[in-house]
Image (cartoon, grey):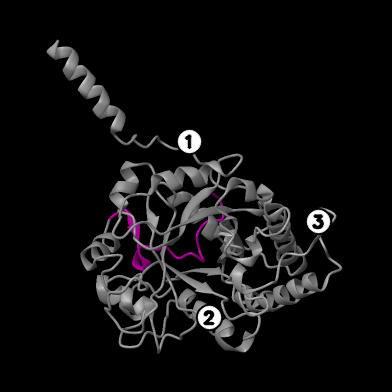
Amino acid sequence: MWKLIVLVIMLMFCASCPSQPEPPEPVEPPVINAGSLSDNAQRLLNFLADEYGNRIISGQMDTAWAENNRMDMIARVFYDTGKYPALKGFDFLDLPHNWSGYGKNQVDEAVEWWEGKNKMYGVTPAAQLLPDRPDIHGIVAFCWHWRTPTEFYTDRTAFRIPWKDGKLDAESAAFQTIKNDLDKVAALLQILKDKDIPVLWRPLHEASGGWFWWGAKDVSAPAARCIALWEYMYDYLTNTKKLDNLIWVWNGQHKDWFPNPDTVHIVGYDVYPRQKDYSSQYQKFRETLEMVPEKNRIVALTENGEIPDPAQCKNDNAMWSWFMTWNDAGYAEGETTSGNFWTGEYHNTNAHKRYVYNHDLVITLDKLPDLSSLSLEN
């Protein structure tokens, strides 16, 4: 009898245990749009594919509302870890109404980052810290909190994706607004193209959440509208504007919002877990991979609060291509508040930050190859 009791207890215990992560299906290197990317964009995409599953690229989001002399996120990372992230995230937050202000400033800082500089105040520039690597190129990513007309949150603007007869209403005033805004963002992205700088381009992010106007659910067919806008944007920027330096990162966060696979190079998910949860987030990793029909795209952690433990990511077969820690809300260095995703210790302790940035599985700026001279063959 006692053996039966022990067996029942063991079965009950195992049933309550969390399931172990299953190895994801093999992810093939991205091969879509072969020949349509600029050489440096293809080199970067090849590099991401080569490293995918082996190492995770470190990333830090910049502050789009403050220049480096007021608030330098890269300097904060260096102060706390002694390392620079390999990837820096920028945001066209102030477009379309401030083209010559922070929109242009973000592009200027992106150029500096690619050129191995950052104009960091109080910190020796990266190029000087790496005298034997004068050709270092920091990876550039851009998202777009698209203000139309002045807000991007659904509950703060009446703007919606124009729709008529099951397709974009190209005759509407709203569509003309979209086209005008795209012309402004294209002009800024053209500056980067002219300097042969590849960009991880992540527009229309978190659409399925509904909190941004491009994913508003108080209209008919919200997913179809967003998909149509994505595909129009892809065609307009790629074919009309000839911006072949863009690597398209889809971040819709639900399979029903996934567009034509030929318009997507990489898929991403934004994860803000509970406080100091440094787990791999492998459930979200699996979920993101399952959104792709062929399951053959790179998966990236396109925004995060807490940084996953790289060792757990390896153990759980959830090797995100990169992580992108969100920026700080406060100007004070080291202040621990919920709005500061890097500085302070609310989300990531100083010990955890040092651990991650000095981990063998993590690529920091000093570990990057010369991204402008890699082979074009994958």
**Residue positioned 35% across, 64% down in the render:** 364
Q: Is residue 361 magenta?
A: yes
Q: Which mark is residue 106?
A: 2
> Measured from the top left, where is residue 253 in percent x and y?
55, 52
Q: Which mark is residue 187?
A: none
Q: Is residue 152 magenta?
A: no
Q: Tell me the amino acid under the disc marked 3.
A: Lys
The segment highlighted magenta reads: 360-378
> Measured from the top left, where is residue 341 in percent x and y?
36, 69
Which of the two discs, 1 and 2, labels the residue nearer the N terminus?
1
Which of the two discs, 3 and 2, labels the residue nearer the N terminus?
2
**Residue positioned 38% across, 42% down in the render:** 317
How crowded pointer 2 is (Cα within 10 Å; few <14, some 14-19, many 20+) is rated as: many
Q: Which mark is residue 25?
A: 1
For residue 59, which quarter of the picture? bottom left
For residue 36, which quarter of the picture? bottom right
Q: Secondary structure at mark 1?
A: loop
Q: Secondary structure at mark 3?
A: strand
Q: Tell me the amino acid under the disc marked 2.
A: Gln
Is residue 130 visible to us here? no
Is residue 124 visible to us here? yes
Question: To which residue does mark 3 refer?
Answer: 167
> Measured from the top left, where is residue 48 in percent x and y?
48, 55
Left or right relative to 37: residue 305? left
The quadrant of the picture occupied by the N terminus is top left
Query: Which residue is situated farthest in the left direction here?
Result: 2
> Measured from the top left, where is residue 251 in percent x and y?
56, 57
Identify which residue, 361 or 93, lies in the foreground: 93
Most frequent secondary structure within the magenta stretch? loop
Q: CA distance from mark 3 to mark 2?
A: 33 Å
Left or right relative to 208: residue 26? left
Q: CA distance from mark 1 to mark 2?
A: 37 Å
